[in-house]
Image (tube, rainbow, N blue to C red):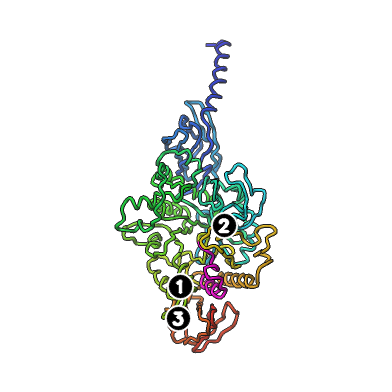
Amino acid sequence: MIMTLKKIETRILILLFVFPFLSLAQTISRIEPSNWWVGMKLNTITLLVYGKEIQSLQPSIKYDGVKILKTEKVENPNYLFVTIKINPQTIAGNVKLDFKKGNTTVITKDFPLLARQTNSANRDSYTQKDAIYLIVPDRFSNGDIENDVIPTLNENVVDRKGDDKRHGGDIQGIINHLDYIKSLGFTQIWCTPLTENDEPLYSYHGYAATDFYKIDPRFGTNQQFKQLVEEAKERNIGIIWDIVLNHCGSEYYFIKDLPTKSWVNFPETHTQSNFLKTTITDIYATEIDKKEYTDGWFDRHMADLNQRNPLMVKYLIQNTIWWIEYAGLSGLRADTYSYSDKEFLAAWTKAILDEYPNFNIVGEEMSRIVAQTSYWQKDKLNFDGYKSYLPTLMDFLLNDNIVSSLTRSNDWFSTWRDTYQGIAQDYQFPHPENQLIFPDNHDLDRFYSRLNNNFDKWKLGIAMYMTMRGIPQFFYGTEVLMTNEKVGSDGQRRSDFYGGWKNDLKNAVTEKGLTGTEKDAKKYFSKLLNWRKSNSAITNGHFKHYAPQKNDVYIYFRYNKEQKVMVLLNKNSENVTLDMNRYSEMISNKFKAKDIITDKELDVKNTLTISGKTAMILEIR
């Protein structure tokens, strides 16, 4: 039948009316993740699709090796969750995601499937062989003044005089300092979160993300972060990603427009956490106390994510793996670790390690109770049968004990006893060598400040952190004795790195404006850290220590089949002469050694004298 001209005109008018209406009714502003890779173990991906009235459309894919397994609708019509399966033989390419109304395609989105980099799954990560430089990017160096202020973001003022304000540091500033960081002896960099934090206040620290897939534009771009990773790798430095699983910022799009009430915990009351970590292991704990710990909001502007929601579980696991693969990360640090649902944590860590078997993840369990911390380590046989997969924990107890030992006055036993007895609790860890050790970090007062600006004690402490079992991490500026005058002030703890801004009066790199003591500290620090890299007894050796005596000298050994190191830490003002027969289990009373600190060659016979207020690191010949 031949269609009349009038009917054709009528249909054209209908189409011209309907299609604009459809395109205005449904929009897509986000698909997360925005891409994936072929050849991944995690090859079943749930896409979060966000857009106006998106649930009224039906997704469709035509691509060899890729199919949609299911589409899930939730309470909010602006969300659609699309689960796709990518077969192992699938070839990299651009997948077209069609969203249809009936048989009509209303929206088409690209979903790239990328090829993985060679040996991506078996990438190296950080171990005892490494030393980590911790940076708060906003406070380290301003390498690009053009991104200081982003008018579209809530906090768009730079104020270096404000402890809690943005100061302007960025990714380019870190790139500019990579040679300096390498020269100090570091092999890893951990930056506090770089993802967008578009909160009205305190946005500089990054721990209230408003976009898990986007670098904060005041730091740079996703591509610029990738550049940082690549340039660091050229210098044999890995980049560790600081990830927050427990919460996000209250300005996040999926908090302001919740997919479902079960997306977050306490969505209406915003009940604050009771911060009682012990509820996890307390056999007498009530269910409400447990719930208020894990489900309570960390802060009023930090929404607590519900990891019992299976869609949230998938979202967080996929986001982590996306960043590892996209940027080429060498490890993770998980913030506020135990505040998340513990079954989720087991699933999350296992998924990461299944994809990257050599990967290391350190969890922040800010506890001084060893049993509380060791509960979370991989291979721990826990009283309740909980199986964790987390390789590494942060050793806050050692941090406190070293400060205590270095600052307390002498009494009837050695002031080193707190440190000794704390390390003696290592039997509670399946892998005690996998503990992150640190003199300070962004949540603690500066090490030099805690030692009352005593340089001799600082050197003793640094010598210990350079040689102790575990993975050492140092906060930027520790190498030049940075301090915080106001105790407990996060803003001052995270003060600006010397020389990170043009026209700074002091510069840690060039040493302009540094005092003689600060220069000596940097030289001492760098010498030990660079030596550390070359000694396998330190980077991959055993640990054995002697109980400290009243002479206030703490002695321990690091050793393996190839090398042996003897560390002596004398806190006394006076010289101490040691009878070497006491140490016969570890070393002969006659031996030759080199003192790494002084470069002196020693020929020890029966006794050894160590000067007051000094450390000796003896590389046994």
Q: Residue at x 38, y 56 (%)?
A: 276
The percent coordinates of residue 455 (x first, y second) are 57, 73
Circle 3 sits on which residue? 586
Around disc 2, counting alpha carbons within 10 Å, would you say few (fewer than 14), some (14 to 19), or many (20 or more)? many
Please say whether residue 229 is visible from this viewpoint: no
Q: Nearer the viewer, mark 2 or mark 3?
A: 2
Q: Residues within 10 Å of mark 1 (few under 14, many from 20)?
A: some
Q: Nearer the viewer, residue 289 or 129?
A: 289
| Label 3 crowd (10 A; few <14 / some 14-19 / many >=20) | some
Whether tag 3 and tag 1 are in contact, CB under 8 A, the answer is no
Q: Amino acid at mark 2?
A: Val
Q: Residue most toward the left?
A: 284
Kind of element beneath mark 3: loop
Q: Which mark is residue 542?
A: 1
Helix, strand or loop under label 1: strand
Q: Which residue is mark 2?
A: 136
Q: Which residue appears at 55% of the width and 20% of the height?
A: 17
Amino acid type at circle 3 is Met
Q: Which image quadrant: the C terminus?
A: bottom right
Please provide the residue range marked out in magenta.
444-466
**Where 482 falls versus 325 (above or below)?**
below
